[in-house]
Image (cartoon, rainbow, N blue to C red):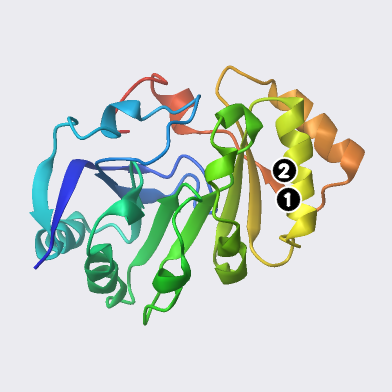
Amino acid sequence: MANFKVVEMFESINGEGRKAGQLAIFIRLQKCNLNCSYCDTKWANGDDAPYTLMNEKEIYNRILESGIKNITLTGGEPLLHKDVEILLEKIGNNLNLSLEIETNGSIELERFSKLKNPPSFTMDYKLPSSKMESKMCLDNFKYLTAKDTVKFVVGTIEDLKKAKEIIERYSLIGKCAVYFSPVFNSIDPVEIVEFMKEKRLNGVNLQLQIHKFIWDPESKGV
């Protein structure tokens, strides 16, 4: 058995990504190794964040009890946790479940890609406005597949230009899903759309965080 520091576990809809609008159960683990300028979960990132210690069997049973098929493991940075492979394998062994990992792009994915039934990864590439771009693990692009997603959280036009550069450098269109997500209240989505039109960014998806329109943007557990 392995133990995991779970800061919250809740049922909602996916606010973004390929399954936006679909029911999901979220498992948020404590701690992050980055400090992004726009982070909206800083409260979960430190060692002092309150948590419930749960082993993989307890987490798995809670998922089954929910009756929800989509699982999102998030943080913080969930892949920082020691023995997280044990949890991924426990959930992944049930082929009726769909497991997505939200990861910040700084953790090597190679070892997780070798699991018997690897999860789908939604991997951030941190752009200049995040102040964390230097922490990105560029080797990760080699391990992304068609079921994975690269998310660019965009706060400025400079961010958009850098995202385009990365998309082209690593030939991401057709390799995995690609999303632009605006920093909430930082950039007008119209600017992103105009950039996409100007640069003819076929295959790139603009997403807005649905949950921030349904609930208060500062709400937890939604």
Task: Sort mark 2 into few (<14), some (14-19) or many (20+) by Cα contacts within 10 Å.
Answer: many
Picture quarter containing residue 65? bottom left
Disc 1 is placed on an element classified as helix
How far across and how far down the image is residue 27, in percent? 26, 48
Can see residue 125?
A: yes
At 41% across and 72% down in the image, what residue appears? 111
Height in image: 147 above or below 51?
A: below
Q: Indicate the quadrant where residue 50 lies.
A: top left
Q: Which one is in front, 37 or 98? A: 37
Judging by the rendered image, the residue that carries numbered circle 2 is 163
Q: Secondary structure at mark 2?
A: helix
Question: Observer-nearest residue: 111 or 73?
Answer: 111
Q: List x then y, in percent, for residue 132.
A: 54, 36
Residue type (three-letter) at the residue carrying disc 1 = Ile
Name which residue type carries label 2.
Answer: Ala
> Which residue is label 1 attached to?
166
Point out the image quarter for the C terminus.
Answer: top left
Vertical side of 119 occupied by 28: above or below: above
The correct choice, above or below, for 214 with respect to 118 in the image is above
Considering depth in this image, is 190 or 21 the residue closer to the camera? 190
Q: Are marks 2 and 1 in contact (CB under 8 Å)?
A: yes
Residue occupying image coordinates x 69% and y 26%? 189
Give the CA distance from mark 2 to mark 1: 5 Å
Q: Quadrant of the N terminus?
A: bottom left
How many numbered circles are shown? 2
Q: Is 22 left or right of 131, judged from the image as shown? A: left
Label 1 neighbour load within 10 Å: few <14, some 14-19, many 20+ = some
Identify the residue shown where x is 58% and y is 33%: 208
User: For the point 64% across and 63% down, which residue is it?
Assistant: 176
Residue 72 rendering spot, x and y as whole percentages:
36, 52
Position above or below: 192 against 216: below
